[in-house]
Image (cartoon, rainbow, N blue to C red):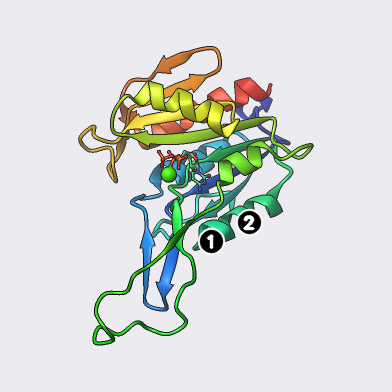
């Protein structure tokens, strides 16, 4: 069927999406990372593109195909993800789905650590930049709509609301990762938390949740 403007409400809009985990090296063969399949972020990138947006997807290490019509940039570390986000601005909307490692080893070792060299290494960690908070505070290039995610295990709405104000974003989409089958699974059950209200969405497959989020974004940017 022919597509009209009503099918592509995000035509002419630019979207930035982060997805997947980040990987922070310890030495050339080891590192620390977060659990994230990347599925929800990739599905959101695809859904935004289907509504006509020009989408840049900044992905940590995941084994997922690039969604149709999406420009993908692969990164490993949080600092690389931040730099790629800043290079992708300006954008009308930023959706920060990535499970960014909160900490990295302060100085990664240039050569492989060996077991026999005096027992386990004492690693010191430093905090990674907060990509969502940094982009939320990006003066004139701040996207009109900045959306963060939160995976919580308890008091989901309370933690989401605290994150909304701490990060300076417009929406937090929160999910309870103790729900069976959510982490790495096909379904998601989310709360959409804005300054004004909380919406509790029914559990649905991640691609359906993604399409609902994309429609909501289109309404907000209209
Ligand atoms: N986020 C980010 N950069 C970071 C950490 C988090 O962009 N260094 C983003 C995530 O992509 C997500 C949101 O911030 O959209 C919330 O992530 P979360 O890990 O829940 O928040 P934190 O502030 O790291 O709090 P917590 O102590 O619960 O991990
Ligand atoms: Ca975190």
Residue 214 position in % (x across, y down): 53, 30
Residue 1 as seen in the image, left or right of residue 200? right
Along the viewing direction, whichever of 117 and 176 lies nearer the viewer: 117
- In the drawing, does residue 213 fall left or right of residue 2? left
Q: Residue at x 67, y 24 (%)?
A: 221
Q: Residues within 10 Å of mark 1 (few under 14, many from 20)?
A: some
Q: Secondary structure at mark 1?
A: strand
Q: Which badge, 2 or 1, comes first in the chain's sequence?
A: 1
Instruction: Between residue 165 and residue 208, name the one nearer to us.
Output: 165
Disc 2 on helix, strand or loop? helix
Residue that carries the numbered disc 1 in the rendered image: 74
- Label 2, label 1: how many angstroms apart (C-alpha)? 9 Å
- Ligand 2 position by quadrant: top left
For residue 1, which numbered disc appears in the image? none
Residue 53 seen in this snapshot: no
Please give the name of the residue rendered at 59% of the width and 30% of the height, measured from the top-left corner: 169
Figure quadrant of the C terminus: top right
Locate residue 95, reporting x and y percent: 55, 38
Q: Is residue 80 visible?
A: yes
Is the residue 20 above or below the residue 203 in the image?
Answer: below
Residue 91 percent across, percent down from the top left: 70, 40
Give whichever of 41, 197 is nearer the camera.
197
**Vertical order, 24 against 178 (above or below):** below
The quarter of the picture where residue 136 lies is: top right
Task: Please state, as top left, top right, bottom left or bottom right, where the N terminus lies in the image.
Answer: top right
What residue sits right under mark 2 in the picture? 84
> At 76% from the left edge and 40% from the top edge, which residue is drawn?
141
**Of marks 2 and 1, the one in the foreground:** 2
Residue 10 at x, y percent in the picture: 66, 31
Name the residue: 39% across, 46% down.
39
């Amino acid at each position: 069927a022919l597509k009209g403007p009503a099918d592509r409400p995000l035509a002419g809009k630019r979207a930035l999406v982060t997805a997947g985990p980040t990987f922070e090296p310890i030495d050339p063969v080891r590192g620390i990372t977060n659990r994230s399949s990347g599925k929800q972020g990739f599905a959101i990138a695809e859904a935004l593109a289907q509504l006509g947006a020009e989408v840049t997807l900044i992905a940590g290490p995941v084994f997922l195909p690039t969604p149709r019509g999406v420009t993908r940039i692969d990164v490993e570390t949080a600092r690389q993800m931040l730099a790629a986000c800043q290079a992708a601005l300006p954008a009308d909307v930023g959706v920060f789905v990535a499970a960014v490692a909160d900490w990295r080893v302060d100085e990664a070792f240039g050569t492989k650590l060996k077991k026999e060299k005096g027992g386990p290494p004492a690693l010191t960690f430093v905090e990674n930049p907060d990509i969502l908070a940094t982009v939320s505070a990006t003066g004139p290039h701040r996207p009109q709509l900045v959306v963060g995610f939160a995976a919580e295990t308890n008091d989901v709405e309370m933690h989401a609301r605290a994150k909304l104000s701490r990060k300076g974003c417009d929406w937090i989409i929160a999910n309870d990762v103790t729900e069976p089958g959510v982490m790495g699974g096909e379904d998601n059950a989310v709360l959409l938390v804005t300054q004004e209200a909380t919406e509790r969405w029914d559990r649905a497959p991640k691609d359906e949740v993604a399409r609902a989020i994309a429609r909501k974004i289109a309404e907000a940017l209209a």
